[in-house]
Amino acid sequence: MAGIATELASFVEKTTFNELPEHLVDQMKLLVLDAIGCAVRGHSTDCGRISAELARKLGGNAGSTIMGMPDKVAVTNAAFANGQLISALDYHPMGTSHDAPAIAAAALSILETTQNTGKDLIISILLGLEITRRITYAAEFQGISSSVFGAAASAGKLLHLNQEKLANAIGLAGFITIPDTLMKYISTHPSQMVKYGPTGWIAQAGVTAALLADMGFTGDTDLFEGEKNYWRFTGKTKSDASGVTANLGKQWETHVEFKLYPGGI
């Protein structure tokens, strides 16, 4: 029997645009527009400005745009900057809490380096949100660390990775995930720029995992199985993996909300 990562990889590889629920396609269109608007305005914050400037300094092969700037940098650096910019004002769209910025940043950044369409972008983001939600709610929700799986899946879909490589990308993403720091962040005053785990790091990690897998780098495709599984090594004491792949592709768990005003964080 295939493990969870392999089943998720198969779902990501095989799902086509025509299989997507119409209402979720409409939400993805708004999500992309909302994310870009948040990123452009994110330059008004110190968090966004510093992140974008770092990505500009790091540079690299000029393949992807830092949103709101004329500069193009290496795709991983763009993913970092764009993830930070989208979430900087806390105005970003919400999927499984704060997963949308990292997933959108990963997809939008890698899109420029590939030959894909707008439909490909929409399906990649939706698939990333769907598997993130399923992995996150297999245990008590404590933060945004599992967004890295969605970022890796979105990037992998746009790279047209096969099931094996997608499973490796997911396996890699779990090993470079950011711990759940949400509760520590919201209980710390005054608030700092770190903001419950920098979204840009998650976007960058997801893109990196997909690129490595595409080159043949292998990951732990059994990371969701066994006593020392993903949820355990990220600090969860209880988990139930049975729902992660239940009715996958038949019953969509993704739900997106759009903020009328920022969270004030």
Image: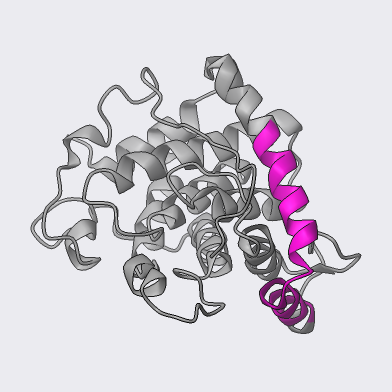
Within the magenta stretch, is there residue 226?
no
The residue positioned 53% from the left and 65% from the top of the image is 265
Q: State the count of labels.
A: 0
The residue positioned 44% from the left and 48% from the top of the image is 97
The residue positioned 73% from the left and 69% from the top of the image is 74
Q: Nearer the viewer, residue 67 or 214?
A: 67
Which residue is the extreme one toward the left? 227
> Image height check: is 242 above or below 77?
above
For residue 168, say whether it is visible: yes
On the rendered image, what quadrant is the N terminus found in? top left
Residue 104 x, y percent position in the rendering? 62, 48
Q: Is residue 48 left or right of residue 25?
A: right
> Image height check: is 92 above or below 191?
above
Query: Which region shows up in magenta?
Result: 30-56
For residue 162, say whether it is visible: no
Residue 102 x, y percent position in the rendering? 56, 56
Q: Nearer the viewer, residue 212 or 38?
A: 38
Residue 179 x, y percent position in the rendering? 34, 70
Residue 212 x, y percent position in the rendering? 51, 63
Q: Nearer the viewer, residue 173 or 213?
A: 173
Rendered image quadrant of residue 169: bottom left
